[in-house]
Image: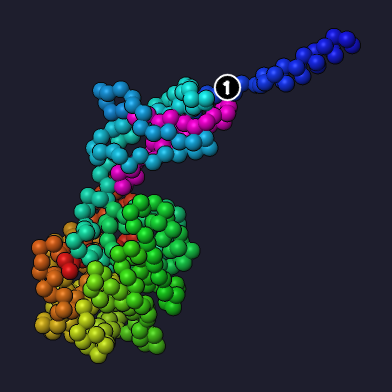
Amino acid sequence: MKRIVEVILLAILLTSCGTTTQPNPQSPQALSAVCNYLQEVTLSWNYDNGVVEGFLIQRKVEGEAFTTIDSVAAGTYEYLDSDVTVDQTYDYQVASIFAGSQYEWSDDVSVYVREGFQSLTFGTEATIDVVTWNIEHFPKNLDTTVNYVSQIMRGINADIYALQEIESNPYFEELIEKLNNEDPVNTWDGYRANTSGYSIDLAYIYKSDQVQLGNIYEIYQDDWYAFPRNPLILEFTFSGNDLIMINNHLKAGGDSDDEARRLEACNKLDTYISNNFPDDEVIVLGDLNDMLTDSQNNVFISFLNEEDEYVFTDMAIAEGSQIYWSYPFWPSHLDHILITNELFDEFELDNSDIQTLMIDTILDNGLNEYDDNISDHRPVGLKLEI
């Protein structure tokens, strides 16, 4: 009994003198490195091997020694490295830190930095950059689609995206939140209509630090025959210029009634622009679901016959190789961008351009990966020097 009391007293004495159990940090486990399509490497790891103050991150390229690139606080198990070079392989390792000392390193991992969506070299500071994009049944692969689309939008770097077939408002809001969380330069906002049948609605996403919103509204709301999805107008200011954008998704299908509905829609859009925006800079765009080059029964005839009033900026794409058409699975070119004559001069300037944005050519598994996770339509982009 006396011996037990002595042991207890000794333990109390040692504790009162500041003796504590020392931590035993070990190496982080399961380190992985993944390169996305924005030329960014995401590191992630697990750690449950003792108390730490943080983690040290090192990197090297072939033929060189590891060097420290950063550190993160305890409780952080992920790191984004955006200071990397395309077509380069990097090795990474991570170590735990306690009391200013670095402990054992994790196993190292390698990752190859692929070419990213920035290689499309689309959006610039010298132009207003607008994109029309039918993101089929968004999001067709849920969070995976949101991740792809966020990377694509940041890579293309357009100022405004006019979107079609946006079925889910929660996922649409998640996309905007993701853009704001991951884009270190721009702020983003958006608007989704909710009046279309089967919820395949029109929407806009835009850089709110570049685009000053005026008004967003729908037209021809009671004309289901011509417009199964109400045209969505965006009035905005960019770099001191007031512009009008009309986003559309015309009736699909190849029979005579479908064509008649598209023809009526184009005639009514022409009339609406003439009556409401006779002297404004207007951009009409969207999934218009027909070919510009049809020699007979061309639904765009009201625009094509008024060469002094309108230009389809993507006519050269429509007349060119099917490799660059916006709907590769038919193939056909269905997504168009029309401008009024108030923008003709700007379209002729050196920095202006029109492109089908060939996202699928950058993906590891090409069109199959694009169709499985994103859409069956490619985006079409216009940049104007204004």
Q: Residue at x 39, y 36 (%)?
A: 33
Q: Residues within 10 Å of mark 1 (few under 14, many from 20)?
A: few
Visible in this render: residue 303?
yes
User: Left or right: where does residue 301 sit relative to residue 9?
Assistant: left
> Colour mode?
rainbow
Which residue is the extreme one toward the top? 3
Residue 20 found in image quarter: top right
User: Left or right: where does residue 264 sit relative to residue 148?
Assistant: left
Q: Position of residue 177 (x, y in %)?
A: 44, 58
Give the amino acid type for the residue marked by disc 1 in the picture. Asn
Position of the N terminus by quadrant: top right
Q: Residue at x 27, y 26 (%)?
A: 62
Q: Nearer the viewer, residue 287 or 182?
A: 182
Q: Residue at x 24, y 72 (%)?
A: 240
Q: Position of residue 215 (x, y in %)?
A: 36, 78
Q: Nearer the viewer, residue 277 or 314?
A: 277
Asked if residue 37 lies in the magenta stretch, the reply is: yes
Which residue is the extreme one toward the right? 1
User: Left or right: where does residue 105 sit relative to residue 325?
Assistant: right
Extent of the magenta region: 31-59
Q: Residue at x 77, y 14 (%)?
A: 10
Position of the C terminus by quadrant: bottom left
